[in-house]
Amino acid sequence: MTKKILLVEDDLPKLTQITEAVSANGIELTIAKSINEAIRKLDESVFDCVLLDMSLPTFNEGANVSSSGRQQDFGGRQILTYMWELEINTRVMLVTQLPGFKNEGGNEVKLKDLDTTLTNDFPGLYMGFTYFHHSTDAWAKRLKDFLEKI
């Protein structure tokens, strides 16, 4: 049975490594590089899971940097909120390389605290995170374990 995965990631090197890690027989991977593109793809298709970056631009990059909209530290949360409100019951795993994120007040929210908040705010939807780092493959093992369970 083919598993349909939506990968929401705007960083090309990270996107490439994640794609290589999850590519296997029976995996159909769809990629979105912005908040708006991810929402459009969620509206167009049903996925078995979403691999989600937290810090994302509003739009895909266009002819110049400003055309992609501002980078939003909690862009991934916007996607989770959209899914929650529309009752899109697709399990989500956060894949991040950042130890924390700036909230709207400019204060840093540590990844561990964000994980707790997302678990409480999106029960049954948000399934946890893996901390991505180019020099280790622990994140890839965690992703594969997650994908085996869906």
Image (cartoon, rainbow, N blue to C red):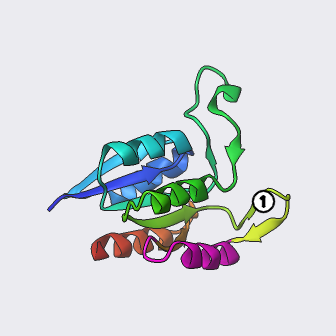
Rendering quarter of residue 144: bottom left
What is the secondary structure assignment of the residue under circle 1?
Answer: strand
Q: Is residue 88 above or below residue 64?
A: below
Task: From the viewer's perspective, tell me whether residue 45 is left or right of residue 116.
Answer: left
Q: Is residue 135 left or right of residue 88?
A: right
* Image coords of residue 74 (percent x, y): 66, 56
Q: Which residues are magenta?
A: 111-125
For the residue carrying disc 1, how many other residues have a C-alpha within 10 Å: few (<14), some (14-19), or many (20+)? some
Q: Nearer the viewer, residue 37 or 133?
A: 37
Instruction: Give x and y (percent) for residue 25.
Output: 19, 57
Q: How many marks?
A: 1
Q: Is residue 51 found inside the magenta-colored segment of the image?
A: no
- Give the quadrant of the C terminus: bottom left
Residue drawn at the location 50% of the way across and 58% of the way down: 52
Instruction: Give 55 or 43, whichever is nearer the viewer.
Output: 43
- The image quarter containing residue 87 is bottom left
> In this rendering, does residue 18 appear at all?
yes
- For disc 1, the marked residue is 102
